[in-house]
Each structure stands twice: as structure tokens, then as C-alpha cells.
Amino acid sequence: VQLQASGGGLVQPGGSLRLSCAASGRTFSIYRMGWFRQAPGKERSFVGTISWSGGSTIYADSVKGRFTISRDNMKNTMYLEMNALQPEDTAVYYCAADDSGGRRWSYWGQGTLVTVSS
């Protein structure tokens, strides 16, 4: 499975941005997909995840109510809708895919930079 993340950029505080993650290859094997982020000088952290079949979602407390993950199975694409962005949301955002039934994140995209600044 190959993952291509896109949609990052510069946004003002309070603004919105939508990231995309296009999957290709053995997409039929995907169990779930997720978003992670790594802020400058910090470790990579979990943002949220979505099950590929049922579409159920889980979010980190820090983004709950502001971020929404969705997917389009026909396009093999996952989205991250980010609202009410704050400077602390500045990070490189990575998408990941799991084909192990929930045991590990097997595949990673290259990351897309989101900068929240006035």
C-alpha cells in the first residue's frame, strides 16, 4: 500500500484546512487508516483513526470537536477536516494505514506541513 498525503499549507488561527491521503496498491487489505502529527521538537502523536469498512472514528482529546476524519472508499482516499486551528496544531501531518487488523500501522505517507500562524 502506498500513501500520498496532501493539502497542507499556511492558515491563520481560527481557520480551516482539509488534508487528503490517497491510498494505492493493495487497498483491499486496509483495515483502518489514521492521521498522526509531529510538531517541531516533539514526538509523533496520534490525531485520529477511521475504520475502512464501517467508518467509525476515534480522536485524540486535543482535536475532538474540531477535527473530522472521513473516507471515500471509491476513491481510496481519507480526509482530515481541521477547523478552529490554533498555533499548537502546527505540525507535519502523516497518514498511515493498517492491514494487520489493528495490531500495527504498516504503511506511512510522506507527511504534509500545516502551519497555523498570523
Image (cartoon, rainbow, N blue to C red):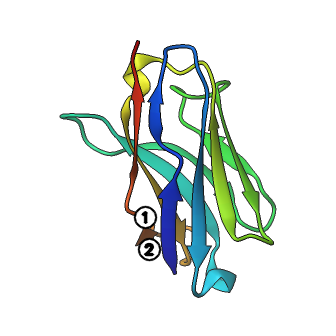
What amino acid type should be assigned to the residue bearing mark 2?
Ser
Q: Nearer the viewer, residue 14 or 41?
A: 14
Q: Residue at x 53, y 70 (%)?
A: 98
* Left or right: 24 in relation to 109: right
The percent coordinates of residue 11 (x first, y second) are 49, 25
Q: Quadrant of the C terminus?
A: top left
- Cα separation between marks 1 and 2: 11 Å
Query: On screen, 37 above or below 83?
Result: below
Q: Name the residue carrying label 1.
A: 109
The percent coordinates of residue 74 (x first, y second) are 80, 72
Task: Tell me if I can see residue 74 in this picture.
Answer: yes
User: How many numbered marks have been drawn onto this rendered protein structure?
Assistant: 2
Quarter of the figure with residue 22: bottom right
Q: Name the residue carrying label 2.
A: 106
Q: Nearer the viewer, residue 98 or 114?
A: 114
Q: Residue at x 44, y 48 (%)?
A: 36
Query: On screen, 98 above or below 113?
Result: below
